[in-house]
């Protein structure tokens, strides 16, 4: 028995939100850096470039993931999302290294910051844009179980936190005159970006390694299986994996040997539909066997 739910259609419209926001904020943040000469604002502008590359990768991968199963990809293309999130994690790590390098150079040779108020005002506008888009991506990434959208949203939220730290640091430079605060804040930003990049990269690798479905989904599945076991049948060899938005579930259903094929077939259909209703975007693969046959337990 094999059945599956249709994954939500094309999510690329959300990737276009990321692309448009990245292009707009790159221009805004670059202007802020050119106005002030702040290495903190430079790090912020550089991360905007990373956002754009990640958003373009996200667009391409979501188009691939939306394609239906074919003869060469019988389980669909949903795993492609992990390549997007993995690439984004790698880009984040690269940006953190560049930011850290520039910050150390400025820390060794501190420089004054010009027109701070103008630069911070411009940077604040870019941060608000990223905040709005990040919330949209994370909300819909969780709704449609898209790791590509969720990773993109988390990246933008990191950008928001980064900008907040940079704005704070540059503001403190204006108040105290301590120019070394600017590169120190940039180093803190780089460390924060490293952590986020590592987390996204780790999640991508786990997905490519056929990680089991989430704990919450496993609890739902266990509840359904337990209820059916009380009706005189047995279910074993339960295997699950998550591939992008798609959850794959397979197990054996053991029924009394004197059941008709029709009765066993109907039970399999009922259990599959119940699981699909409780776990959206799930593909369920069941195998019917006899309770009395010793080979069924091997």
Image (cartoon, rainbow, N blue to C red):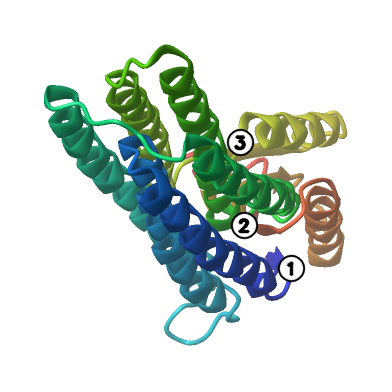
**Where is the N terminus found, in terms of image quarters?**
bottom right
Image point (39%, 48%), residue name: 33
Residue 8 numbered mark, or none: 1
Q: Earlier in the sequence, mark 3 or mark 2?
A: 3
Image x and y of residue 165, in percent: 49, 26
Image point (86%, 61%), residue name: 266
Q: Residue furthest top?
A: 176
Picture mark count: 3
Q: Residue furthest bottom?
A: 71
Q: Are marks 2 and 1 in contact (CB under 8 Å)?
A: yes
Image x and y of residue 42, in percent: 34, 45
- For this view, does 168 lie left or right of residue 222? left
Residue 75 in view here = no
- For this view, does 260 lie left or right of residue 173? right
Residue 245 numbered mark, or none: 2
Which residue position holds label 3?
A: 214
Image point (61%, 36%), residue name: 214
């Amino acid at each position: 028995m094999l059945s599956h739910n249709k994954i939500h259609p094309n999510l690329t419209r959300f990737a276009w939100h990321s692309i448009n926001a990245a292009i707009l904020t790159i221009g805004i943040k670059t202007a802020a850096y050119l106005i002030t000469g702040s290495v903190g604002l430079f790090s912020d502008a550089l991360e905007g470039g990373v956002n754009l590359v990640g958003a373009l990768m996200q667009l391409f991968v979501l188009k691939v993931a939306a394609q239906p199963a074919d003869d060469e990809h019988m389980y669909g293309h949903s795993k492609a999302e992990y390549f997007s999130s993995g690439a984004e994690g790698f880009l984040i790590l690269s940006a953190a290294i560049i930011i850290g390098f520039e910050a150390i150079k400025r820390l060794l040779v501190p420089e004054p910051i010009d027109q701070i108020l103008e630069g911070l005002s411009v940077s604040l506008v870019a941060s608000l844009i990223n905040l709005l888009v990040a919330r949209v991506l994370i909300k819909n990434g969780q709704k449609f179980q898209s790791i590509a959208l969720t990773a993109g949203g988390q990246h933008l939220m990191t950008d928001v936190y980064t900008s907040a730290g940079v704005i704070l640091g540059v503001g403190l430079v204006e108040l105290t005159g301590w120019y070394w605060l600017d590169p120190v804040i940039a180093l803190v930003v780089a460390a924060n970006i490293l952590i986020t990049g590592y987390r996204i990269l780790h999640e991508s690798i786990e997905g490519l390694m056929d990680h089991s479905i989430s704990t919450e989904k496993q609890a739902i599945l266990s509840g359904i299986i337990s209820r059916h076991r009380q009706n005189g049948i047995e279910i074993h060899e339960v295997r699950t994996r998550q591939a992008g938005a798609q959850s794959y579930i397979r197990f054996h259903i053991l029924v009394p040997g004197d059941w008709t094929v029709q009765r066993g077939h109907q039970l399999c259909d009922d259990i599959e539909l119940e699981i699909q209703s409780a776990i959206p975007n799930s593909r369920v693969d069941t195998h019917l066997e006899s309770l009395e046959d010793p080979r069924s337990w091997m």
